[in-house]
Image: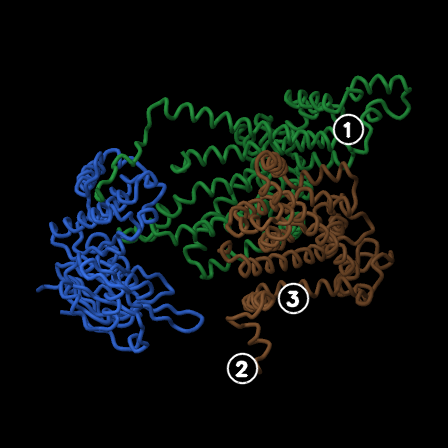
């Protein structure tokens, strides 16, 4: 009696179709539902911000000298006479059609403007995250494996400085030293003045466009311009990623299955990478997604410093000229990307972690 | 008990700390033949450290010192790390306490076993797979193909520990160190796991070091027992003569256990003598 | 028992004689282990000096931070009477940095008061009441977490208008959700514990349980988190100031000072460099302090 053990406790790795399909559908629906709620909430917040704004949207359109009747007509046309909730639904409807209204500055649809500036930010942040991951992950792993050694100290200082440094100031210092004094890199902007609009814009990513066009002069010039802001953003994500990697790795390295791997006679390199690192992949993906989202945000200040014509510059410029549609449109788009990145990392989590199934 | 497999002489494990060096194991000596050697002690007595020190698994800042840890005449303490890796798994292996923690949670059981085999054998994946299936069958796992595909969290504790034994025995080592292999398991499956381990160890003529806090279990299961206290061996005796043990600590342990054949009103509380922790370690070398 | 035991012995006792004794003893032992952490002590000292400087600003500042002197404009480092040089309007940079410390501390203190308290309220209520309240409150928290913080703060400031108080409000609005999460998690573990059941049996109401028994236990993890967030708050405030959305000129806010100096960065580097160093030093100090506090108060979370 005491010796009997149910061997069927180990579930098969592939259950019959009906057993996993419907739960999967219900999970997907739940996820979608919660995304929708978050999205609506996000739009509600921006909507409210738009309403409490001390700017009269009607005046902004009709101008100061318009007659009362014109004013009233536009007022009704904008739906401002309707209850707040109806106005919100209108807003929701518009945003779902990617219609963020027109910019008060240049009278163009905000969505077009955003589509134009967004690739610049994407290019910058992507290059930044590549730096951050390529350098930060190995640094964090090494710091954990050689805990207390000089490399751990270096990693600690790198992270501390990264957490404490104002990004816009470091950007200025970078410009001063590498552009002003040493002249190693290009200055502000995406390309030098002679290279503007030389290659046709296909993807909007200037490095890719130049490569597609085979115009290596433009590529070189664009690279010399992007390298400094991208390494700057990369440094901040490196600080975060290396720190998180280190603490994840420390947790895994003290786990008993690591001893098992050593008992098997495995080399330390394989113990670290094949066993410990494999266990932190999932957490790491979340951190990288979060870090990428933070880069989009960090790019607001970086873009100002480097006159980078991306979404950060766009929002800030709009802000300073009280172009509310543009500000809210930009905010919504960045918020959306945040949400998408979160979903993405959740999905990867489910793919990579056998326990999450 | 001729031809000792392992000869450990004057083994120390030290951990430097802020308040000086802490000695976890203090001058332990013993030999291991093709037998089942039990090491008994309470937590902190250094019994687990002794097991891990033999495999040189103590990580810095911990220090392992010994006059010798000789395996077939080769002194493990002098081996390069690279050569030590050839010893681990292939010649000496170890089963740990809780399969929930000692199996890698994100790798399939199959891959973990195959890996253990291929680290020491120049075998193809298919050969290793076949070998792993056989090994799983040897530890009485039904439906091994399914288990090979499964992840550790899908296994019960008893199955996990049998998988662990399979994984550790697949390179065919000469010595197995079992560090509290049944303490984390349900009482109902403990015996089953022990029997499987016992059978395999006997069949293969291996030496077994069985580390446990459970005196009755060790007395039952092993041939010879070392009793450790505060990093030292205080007494060595044959398992079947345990009741004739002399040392007051061993006696105290025995008297603090309830016995079916000798029911008592009150169990004794173990009285510790500070003398025990300064007396030199008893040698268990034959 | 020795009657002549010193205060130190009294504090280090293994057998406290009263609740207060035990509390003080725990505090003292925490302090001892904190003191052993050199980096954390450096952080603490920097902050003590900063507070003293802010308090004594009128006494130690060599010049009036607002007085312009166009004749002395853009004087370099080490100029007679202007150790850190002057800015584009001839104002003494050192004096402006000293007065700027007040603004920085003001912003940090306000945010550190508002955000954790708001988070604590939301989190404990959500965790304790549970059910729909929990779902709704946590949904709201998630929505705020879904926003990039700086961009949300920008939008808020745009709605509220530029200025220090609005910057504080905007940063607080973006900073509270993590605290709510922490407080909720703590509440959930405390809520089901046996001693809460015991208090309930004694007839304590939810209000009393939350304020007297749950809040005190959430405090230590919140303090650690706030200290670690301080650096972020400083950087956010400086960022808003840099964008011209925080403190307005001629206020000697450090971020705004960098923004002013930016135009001269290539020729007169010190104008933008000095305030940046000040921001860096202070947020570094907060990070060091926070690391040290975490090791003492919440050892599990460390390394």
Q: Earlier in the sequence, mark 2 or mark 3?
A: 2
What subunit carries mark 2?
C
Closer to the camera, B252 or A292?
Answer: B252
Question: Mark 2 or 3, which is nearer the eye?
Answer: 2
Question: Which residue matches tag 1?
Answer: A105
Q: Output the letter for the chain in green.
A: A
Question: Mark 3 or 1, which is nearer the eye?
Answer: 3
Closer to the camera, A187 or C172?
Answer: C172
Position of residue B18 measured from the top left corner of the image (x, y, whole percent): 45, 70
Q: Is residue B136 above or below residue C228?
A: above
Name the residue rendered at 79%, 65% in the picture: C56
Q: Output the letter for the chain in blue.
A: B
* Label 2 close to label 3 by CB (< 8 Å): no
Question: Which residue matches tag 2?
Answer: C2
What subunit carries mark 1?
A
- A212 horizontally vs A142: left or right: right
Question: Which residue matches tag 3?
Answer: C45
Asked if marks 2 and 3 fall on the same chain, the answer is yes
* Mark 3: secondary structure: helix
Name the residue rendered at 30%, 74% in the picture: B277
Q: Quadrant of residue B148?
A: top left
Cα distance in 3D space between marks 3 and 1: 49 Å
Q: Output the letter for the chain in brown.
A: C
Position of residue B258 measured from the top left corner of the image (x, y, whole percent): 25, 60
Position of residue C43 measured from the top left corner of the image (x, y, whole percent): 62, 63
Label disc, if present, on residue C192 of the rendered structure: none
Disc 2 residue crowd, few under 14, some 14–19, many 20+, Cα 10 Å: few
Q: Quadrant of residue B159?
A: top left
What subunit carries mark 3?
C
Cα distance in 3D space between marks 2 and 3: 36 Å
Q: Quadrant of residue A117?
A: top right
């Amino acid at each position: 009696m005491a010796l009997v053990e149910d061997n069927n406790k180990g579930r098969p790795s592939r259950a019959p179709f009906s057993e996993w399909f419907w739960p999967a559908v219900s999970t997907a629906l739940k996820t979608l539902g919660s995304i929708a709620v978050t999205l609506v909430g996000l739009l509600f917040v921006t909507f409210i911000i738009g309403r409490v704004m001390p700017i009269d949207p009607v005046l902004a359109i009709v101008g100061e000298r318009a007659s009362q009747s014109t004013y009233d007509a536009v007022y009704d046309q904008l739906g401002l006479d309707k209850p707040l909730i109806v106005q919100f639904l209108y807003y929701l409807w518009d945003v779902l059609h990617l219609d963020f209204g027109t910019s008060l500055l240049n009278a163009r649809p905000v969505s077009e403007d955003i589509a134009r500036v967004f690739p610049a930010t994407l290019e910058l942040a992507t290059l930044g995250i590549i730096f951050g991951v390529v350098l930060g992950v190995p640094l964090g792993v090494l710091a954990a494996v050689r805990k207390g050694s000089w490399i751990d100290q270096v990693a600690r200082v790198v992270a501390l400085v990264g957490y404490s440094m104002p990004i816009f100031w470091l950007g200025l210092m970078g410009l001063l030293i590498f552009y002003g004094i040493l002249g190693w890199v290009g200055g502000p902007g995406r390309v030098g003045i002679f290279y503007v609009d030389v290659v046709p814009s296909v993807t909007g990513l200037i490095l890719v466009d130049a490569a597609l066009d085979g115009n290596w002069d433009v590529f070189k010039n664009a690279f010399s311009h992007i390298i400094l802001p991208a390494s700057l953003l990369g440094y901040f994500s490196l600080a975060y990623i290396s720190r998180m990697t280190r603490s994840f790795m420390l947790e895994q390295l003290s786990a008993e299955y690591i001893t098992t791997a050593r008992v098997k006679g495995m080399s330390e390199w394989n113990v670290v990478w094949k066993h410990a690192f494999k266990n932190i992949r999932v957490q790491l993906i979340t951190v990288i997604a979060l870090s990428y989202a933070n880069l989009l945000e960090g790019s607001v200040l970086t873009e100002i410093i480097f006159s980078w014509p991306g979404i950060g510059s766009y929002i800030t410029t709009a802000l300073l000229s009280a172009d509310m549609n543009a500000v809210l449109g930009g905010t919504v788009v960045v918020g959306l990307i945040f949400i998408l990145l979160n979903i993405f990392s959740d999905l990867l989590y489910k793919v990579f972690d056998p326990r999450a199934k | 008990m001729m031809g000792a497999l392992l000869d450990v002489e004057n083994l120390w494990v030290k951990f430097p700390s802020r308040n000086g060096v802490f000695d976890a194991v203090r001058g332990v000596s013993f030999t291991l033949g093709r037998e089942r050697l039990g090491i008994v002690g309470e937590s902190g007595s250094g019994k687990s450290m002794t097991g891990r020190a033999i495999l040189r698994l103590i990580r810095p800042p911990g220090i392992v010192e010994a006059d010798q840890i000789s395996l077939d005449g080769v002194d493990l303490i002098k081996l390069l790390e690279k050569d030590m890796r050839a010893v681990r798994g292939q010649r000496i292996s170890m089963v740990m306490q809780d399969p929930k923690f000692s199996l890698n949670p994100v790798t399939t059981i199959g891959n973990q076993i195959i890996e253990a085999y291929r680290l020491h054998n120049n075998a193809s994946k298919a050969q290793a797979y076949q070998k792993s299936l056989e090994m799983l069958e040897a530890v009485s796992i039904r439906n091994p193909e399914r288990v090979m595909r499964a992840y550790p969290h899908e296994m019960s504790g008893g199955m996990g520990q049998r998988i662990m034994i399979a994984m550790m025995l697949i390179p065919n080592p000469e010595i197995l160190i079992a560090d509290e292999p049944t303490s984390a398991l349900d009482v109902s499956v403990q015996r089953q796991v022990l029997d499987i381990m016992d059978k395999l160890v006997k069949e293969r003529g291996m030496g077994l070091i069985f580390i446990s806090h459970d005196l009755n279990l060790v007395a039952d299961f092993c041939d010879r027992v070392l009793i450790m206290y505060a990093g030292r061996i205080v007494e060595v005796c044959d398992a079947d003569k345990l009741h004739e043990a002399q040392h007051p600590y061993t006696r105290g342990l025995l008297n603090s256990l309830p016995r079916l054949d000798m029911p008592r009103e009150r169990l004794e509380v173990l009285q510790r003598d500070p003398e025990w922790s300064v007396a030199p370690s008893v040698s268990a070398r034959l | 028992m020795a009657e002549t035991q010193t205060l130190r012995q009294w504090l280090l006792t293994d057998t406290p004689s009263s609740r207060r004794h035990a509390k003080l003893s725990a505090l003292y032992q925490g302090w001892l282990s904190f003191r052993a952490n050199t980096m954390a002590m450096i952080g603490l000292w920097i902050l003590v000096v900063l507070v003293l400087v802010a308090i004594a600003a009128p006494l130690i500042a060599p010049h009036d931070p607002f007085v312009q002197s166009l004749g002395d404009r853009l004087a370099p480092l080490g100029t007679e009477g202007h150790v850190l040089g002057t800015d584009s309007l001839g104002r003494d940079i050192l004096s402006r940095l000293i007065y700027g410390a007040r603004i920085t501390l003001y912003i940090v203190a306000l945010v550190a008061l508002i955000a954790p308290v708001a988070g604590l309220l939301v989190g404990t209520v959500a965790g304790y009441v549970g059910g729909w309240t929990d779902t709704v409150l946590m949904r709201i928290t998630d929505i705020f977490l879904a926003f990039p913080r700086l961009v949300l703060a920008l939008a808020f400031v745009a709605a509220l208008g530029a200025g220090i108080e609005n910057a504080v409000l905007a940063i607080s609005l973006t900073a509270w959700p993590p605290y709510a999460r922490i407080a909720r998690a703590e509440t959930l573990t405390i809520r089901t514990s046996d001693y809460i059941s015991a208090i309930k049996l004694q007839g304590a109401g939810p209000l009393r349980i939350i304020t007297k028994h749950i809040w005190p236990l959430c405090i230590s993890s919140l303090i650690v988190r706030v200290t670690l967030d301080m650096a972020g708050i400083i950087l956010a405030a400086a960022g808003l100031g840099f964008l011209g959305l925080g403190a307005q000129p001629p206020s000697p806010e450090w971020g705004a000072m960098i923004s002013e100096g930016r135009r001269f960065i290539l020729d007169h580097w010190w104008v933008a460099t000095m305030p940046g160093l000040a921001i860096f030093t202070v947020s570094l100090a907060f990070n060091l302090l926070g690391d040290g506090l975490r090791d003492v108060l919440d050892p599990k979370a460390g390394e």
